[in-house]
Amino acid sequence: MKSAVIVFPGSNCDRDLAVALEQVTGRAPTMVWHQESALPDGTDLIALPGGFSYGDYLRSGAMAARSPIMRAVIDAAGRGVPVLGICNGFQVLTETRLLPGALMRNARLNFVSRPVALKVENTQTLFTSGYNAGEVIRIPVAHHDGNYQADAETLDRLEQTGRVALRYAEEVNGSARSIAAIINEAGNVLGMMPHPERAIEAAHGSMDGRRLFEGLLETVS
């Protein structure tokens, strides 16, 4: 699997994500700077890492969404190339409207950084095929603006069409309907606040994140 990790000024999880992808796929991803205008030929997976792109000025992900490379990412997503946005990457995906809704300040206005319990809601996606439906997994979060919100009609549509991929199994940030991860209508774009790249080996305290990357390797390759 040929993957690409997009790097913005302020990204701080790009190397962690690159290590996770290389460990699971056996191939180092291409690190693509935000000012580039094109993705490497034959890219099978695009990953947007966590961090604080552009220092979270204006809104988290708002400036990164307007970086030159995002035009290529949007075009690739439209062609069906899988796109994974983690934490700040999820925020960028909502700002580009590749995913609906918005990530707001956490309900208690605090930064949350700890492993959390997540319920797997949909295993029929490129990203979650390595899990069992209803399974509870543990993956760390680290965010201040992870409170997912959308209007009632959008939330109902996400629920009715199986586009809620992961749900918090405990109170974390006030997200509407405890949503932790959603997919787009076509099923090839996933945004998630938890960090699977921080749960890929035993030393991390959980390997539940590894199965996300293994599932991608199996379904995308």
Image: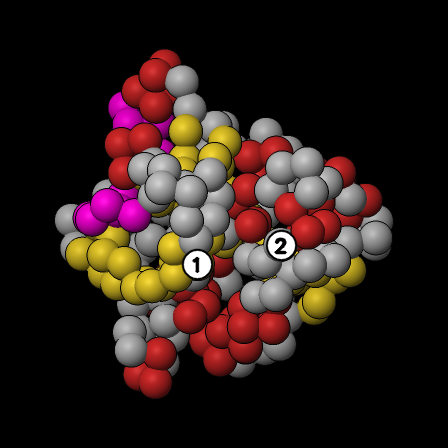
Disc 1 from disc 2: Cα separation: 11 Å
Q: Which residues are magenta?
A: 158-172
Classify mark 2: helix, strand or loop: loop
Residue linked to disc 2: 52
Task: Give the amino acid type for the residue marked by disc 1 in the picture.
Answer: Ala
Q: Quick check: is 166 in the magenta stretch?
A: yes
Q: Is residue 105 above or below residue 218?
A: above
Viewer-closest of 122 and 124:
122
Q: Earlier in the sequence, mark 1 or mark 2?
A: 2
Which quadrant of the view contains residue 8? bottom right
**Residue occupying image coordinates x 50% and y 31%:** 102
Kind of residue at badge 2? Phe
Where's residue 61, x and y in %? 63, 42
x, y percent for residue 38: 80, 51
Which disc, if any, is residue 142?
A: 1
- Measured as percent of width and height from the top left, residue 113 is found at 39, 61
